[in-house]
Structures are given as C-alpha cells and as structure tokens.
Amino acid sequence: MNTDLKTIILVDDDPTNLAVGSDALGEYYDVLTLNSGARLLKALEKNIPDLILLDVEMPEMNGYEVIKLIKGKPETAHIPVIFLTAKSDDENELEGLSSGAIDYIIKPFSPALLRKRIELHLLVESQKLELVNFNNNLQEMVDAKTRMVVELQNSVMKTMAELVECRDHITGGHIERTQHYLKIMLDALVKERIYEKEVPSWNITLVLQSAQLHDVGKIAIEDGILKKPGRLTAEEFEKIKEHPAFGKKVIEKIKESTTERDFLDYAEVIAISHHERWDGSGYPYGLRGEEIPLLGRIMAIADVYDALVSERPYKKAFTHEEAARIIADDSGKHFDPVLVSLFLGVSDKFREAAVTYRAQEALHGN
C-alpha cells in the first residue's frame, strides 16, 4: 500500500463494477474493493478510508442501510460517502443525499468523470479538515492567552496583597486565610442554592482571586497606625476605617489602565463593602441589610472569623467555638442572618482550616 495516496473503499456486489472501478482509480488512489455492506462495516473496524464509493442496490443490506450505520457511529460518521447507482430519478438521488451521501453518481460512469468528482470531494474534505485544525489551533491560542491573562491578574493581585501584608506584619497570613474561608462560604452557597439570583452569575475563580485585594487600601495608612502593637485610639481607628475607601480608589486607578476588568470589579466591591454591618453601623457608608453587596457580606464573616481566631499583640486568639458563638450572636447585627446560618452549617470546615494554618505557623515559628 502506498501511504502517500488517499485510500478509497469501493463497495459493489457486481464483480465487473469492482474491476472497472479499481482500474479507473488504482493509479491515483489505494483502492480496496468489497462486495457487500457487511464486509465494509467489518473493514471499518480496523481501517478508516478517506472516501467510500457505495453501491445502492445490493442484496441483504442496501446502500441506504449501510450509510445509516456508518453515519451513526462517531468514529466513522465523518467519512465522505458517494453513492453509485443505476437509478437516475430525482427521488432516489434525493434519498441518497438526504441519508448523508455527499454525491450521487449514475452507473455506468465515465472513469475520468469519476476521478474528477472524487478529486473535488477529497479537496473539499481536505479544506474542511484544515479549517477544523485552524479553529482548534485558534482555540488553543485563545485558551493560552486566557491563561496568561488570569496568571497576570493573579500575579498583580498577589503582589499588591503581599505588599500590604509586608507593611501590616501584625496580621500576617490574613489574606491567604480569609481567601480560604471565603471559598468555604462560596462553595456552601452554591451547594445550598442560596441567593440564587446573584451567585450563579459570578465567576467564582475570579471572586476568590480578587478577594486578595480586600485590604489593599491599608497601603495608604501610615505605618505608625498600621504597625501599632497595641490597641488603637479612637482617632487612630477612624484613620483605619478609611482603608476601604482607599482600596476602592486604588482598584479604580488600576481599572483605568486595563481592559480586563471583571476581577477588578469583584475586588472593588469586596474592598469597599466588607466592613459594612447588617444593622447599618459599619463603614464607610453605613449601609444596612441587603443594601450591602452580597460579596461584602460574605467577606465580612470570613474576615471577622480570621481576626477572632488569630492572636494579636492586644488579644489572645479565640477558640473556634468562641468565634463561632460571637458570629452567631451578631446575626442580624453585624452579619446577614442567612449567611450566619450558612456559616454555622460549615463551621467544622472553618475549624479544620484554622487548625491547619495554626500548625503551619507554629512550624515556621510565626
């Protein structure tokens, strides 16, 4: 077999037709001749040709029955089939084309015409394959570009988040931990189908990435306040309360210079709203209830839980049970009651994560 030639299977129950077809095509193609549809189906289990020439009128299984089986299997459905038939009426030709054949050639055929028809159809199939390959390559290029954009987004956010943590050493590790707690809450929201009007429209991956910037506004807070080892004065706390608004401004500035805005939109919402309180006593805007964006309400629980179970120079770490009780007691005051209920349902996962982080910090001497 010449591997440089296209392969054609010619199927006809008449030996004379097989001989004529083989002589007409043998110089130009690798031709396999078979005398029944059953033998064709058997051959296709091991060999996939470039084209099939299929007689319509055959005993036991006619061409229409054969092509139906060919087109019904994913591994053979793509093979172009040309019907060969002695019937020249429009009805039979229409039936042949409707069944999936690409052409309908009347016997007896001219060898030159047969070769030209086959040549044209193989050219079309080749061009179709090139188009498919082009589209696949184009999709791969798009996917690669998308991965690059996502990696860039994550790199920018991680760098900025680490810059904030580098300044605010007292709360080291806070960004990674709150991101983990946020994921627990988001997974539970999706599973329990809570707030279905909003959550399904979110890109959860981007939400989690953007959460790294929830405290980016602290970059504008002076070191004397940010690094103070003890409790803040009322005046200093008022300065700290400005960091959500600063964060919003930082993110808005980044958005001015990029077209990749989705993750920054999420980041902006979280940054500005995660210190608002359900009863309206939060900051910076004093929003109340569902006026507070849902992302901010979720982040508030993750943020406060981490603050409670983490040690600070001015306080010892609360136990998980104490932290969960404080959050439960603040349902309807600090926190969205629906989200508090959700938190309590997955609090064991919060406990496991907190224990793991505490062990890691102890191992590294933090």
Image: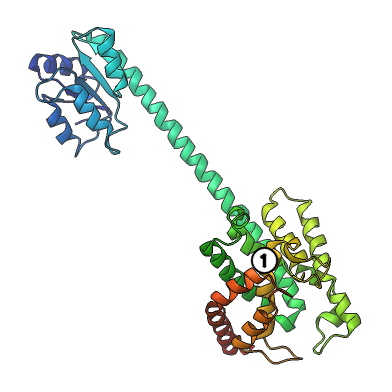
Could you say which quadrant of the image residue 211 lies in? bottom right
Q: Is residue 323 left or right of residue 57?
A: right
Which amino acid type corresponds to the residue marked 1 in the rendered image? Ala
Q: Position of residue 234 (x, y in %)?
A: 89, 83
| Residue under label 1 | 211
In terms of image quadrants, where is residue 104? top left
Q: Residue furthest right?
A: 235
Vertical arrangement, residue 250 with respect to residue 365, above or below: above
Viewer-proximal residue, 362 or 26?
362
The quarter of the displayed image where residue 342 is located: bottom right
Question: Secondary structure beneath disc 1?
Answer: helix
Which quarter of the image is occupied by the C terminus? bottom right
Residue at (67, 77) in percent of width and height: 174
Q: Mark yes or no: residue 174 visible.
A: yes
Q: Is 303 on the left or on the right of 362, as rendered? A: right
Residue 261 at what x, y percent from top left? 70, 52
Which residue is more in the foreground, 353 or 53? 353
On-image quarter of the N terminus: top left
In this view, 141 is above or below 130: below
Picture residue at 75% right of the left edge, 73% below the top: 164
Query: In the image, residue 166 lies at what x, y percent?
Result: 73, 77
Between 296 and 143, the residue placed more toward the observer is 296
Residue 25 x %, y %:
21, 18
How packed mark 1 is, by other alpha carbons closer than 10 Å (few <14, some 14-19, many 20 or more), is many
Residue 158 at least partly seen:
no
Q: Is residue 339 above or below residue 83?
A: below
In the displayed structure, 252 sits above or below 227; it is above
